[in-house]
Every structure is written in C-alpha cells, then in structure tokens.
Amino acid sequence: MGEFLTDLPRYPFLQHALLVGALAGVACGIIGSYVVTKKISTIAGSISHTVLGGLGAARYCQVVHGWDWFHPLYGAVLAALIAALVIGLVGMKARQREDTVIGALWAVGMAAGILFISRTPGYSEDLMSYLFGSILMVSAGDLWLIAGLDLFVVVVAALFYNQFLAVCFDEEFARLRGVRVEGFYLLLLCMTALTVVLLVTVVGIIMVIAIITLPAAVAGEFTKRLWHMMLLSALLTVAFTTAGLALSYGPDLPAGATIIAVAGTVYLASVVGVRLFRLKR
C-alpha cells in the first residue's frame, strides 16, 4: 500500500488506472443497478464474452488489412451492441429460445475472438490481456474513448430514468402508462453493452459481470430507492478499484483479480452482516 502511494504521483500509468476506475464507477453504478434489479446478469455475461470476437476482429483488420483507425475498442463496442440487440429481439419475439441464444453468443463470441487472434500475424499478448483486465495499460487515448462511452450512458440514463425504472420493476404497469417497453428494454441492453466494454479494460472479460453486479448488490442491501442504489454502487466501484490497485501493486498481483476479490469479500461480509443484524432485532 505504501509503495503504491509513493509511486502514484510519479507514474502516469497509475494515475490513468485510478482515473479509469473512477470513470467505470459512474457507468457501473447506473447500469449495475439496472442489471441487478432487472435480473439480467446472464445477458450481460453473454454480451461480455462476445466482446472478445469484436476485439479479435478489429486487431485482425488492423494488421492484415491495414485499418489502423479501427481501434480494438471500436470492434468491442460493435460486437457488444450487436449481441445486445440480438438477445433483446429474440427475448421479445421468442422468449423460450432466449437462453439458447444467450449461450450460443457466449460461446461463439469467445471462439471467434480466439480464431481471429490466432490468424493475426505478429500476435501479441496485449489483446489476450482483455480476458483478465489491463487497467495498468490504459492509455490517454483509451481514457477519452471510455469517457465518451461513460458520458453517453449517464446522459441517456438521466433522460429516461423514469421509463427505465418502470421497465425494471413492472413492465405491465409501464405498458398501461404508455411506455414503449420493448424500445426501452433494447436501449437498456445497449447501454449495458457499452458499460461492459468500458469495464472490460478494468477487470477483463472473464470477471466483468462481477464488477457490474457486486457493487450494486452491496448497495441494494443498504438502500431502498433506485437512485440511492446507483450513487452508492458508483462510490463502491471506485473504492473497490482503488483498493484493488493499491493491494495488488506491491506484491505484483493481477489488478483485475484483486479488484474482484475485494468486491466479493465486501459483498459476502455485507450479506452476512445484514442477515445477522436482522436476526438480532
């Protein structure tokens, strides 16, 4: 911990890591609360694993076809949005097949990513680092891209807060009030997809669902209103990423895994603590 605090003012990569953790906290607090409330963590998991296909395809196009402008995160965003729309449309039209589509996209996305990576000349391990997170490798350019995605999520969530609230808690009531449930559900899935892409840079594809759901789940234990849950979840995400970075830096542990370990520990402690407190009352 002391070594982390000493090196933080001297090394830009540590400052970038803290900043991306703060940016992630904003979107994670909002979308994570919706994901937990709506109980769509499985859908978010499928989207996150499809991201690898987009990353691999973008890198392949960069190297083989010379598309230098096609940043891997652009491919990730495109793949995530396509997966969100496919799952959402299938869920609305043929709900009994939704689980099959979720599982298929989960597997095919990962397989496609690995195939693209294997066929890319001059393969480097930095793309595979997206599997487990690369928060210490975030560049200034990545920060601007992530900030843009973050801003979009925040603005849309603020504009349509009441509609999303109705869709998450009572779809039938929302329809009776004239809310276009299907449209807002697809929009929510697309925002979830963008948040997944943002968080992949922090903890990686494998563990992205944990960082989306755990802070929101902890916040849900102590709050009653959705916006309170969002705010507390955002603060917890920032706290978890900061603590994970500090704890992993000295012993040279994987930052993404340490962040999830901190979040999981706090979640288990909060659940047990709340249950024991209620039993004693």
Image (cartoon, rainbow, N blue to C red):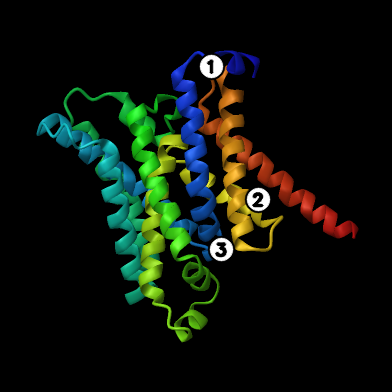
Which of the two residues, 136 or 64, is positioned nearer the viewer here? Answer: 136
> Is residue 113 depicted above or below 63 in this figure?
below
Percent x, y of residue 63: 15, 29
Question: Which residue is tagged 2?
Answer: 218
Q: Position of residue 98 (x, y in %)?
A: 37, 67
Q: Which residue lies under the disc numbered 1?
A: 9
> Residue at coordinates 55% horizontally, 14% vertically from top-left?
7
Q: Which residue is at a point 39% across and 77% down the rendered structure image?
A: 180
**In which quarter of the view is residue 90 placed?**
bottom left
Residue kind at label 3, given as amino acid type: Thr
Residue 173 shown left or right of residue 183 in the figure:
right
Element at label 3: helix
Can see residue 46? Answer: no
Number of the front mark, 2 or 1: 1
Identify the disc placed on residue 37: 3
Left or right of residue 246, residue 28 in this image: left
Image: 278 above or below 22: below
Looking at the image, the residue that sits furthest to the bottom is 176
Sequence-earlier tag: 2 or 1: 1
Residue flagged by tag 2: what amino acid is it? Val
Marks 1 and 3, the one that precedes in the sequence: 1
The residue closer to the viewer here, 53 or 73, is 73
Viewer-nearest residue: 189 or 117 = 189
Q: Is residue 103 left or right of residue 59?
A: right
Circle 1 — which element?
Answer: loop
The quadrant of the image that shows the N terminus is top right
> CA gap, disc 2 to disc 3?
12 Å
Q: Is residue 203 left or right of residue 248?
A: left
Q: Amino acid at mark 1?
A: Pro
Res 181 seen here: yes
Which residue is found at the position 45% from the left and 25% from the top? 136
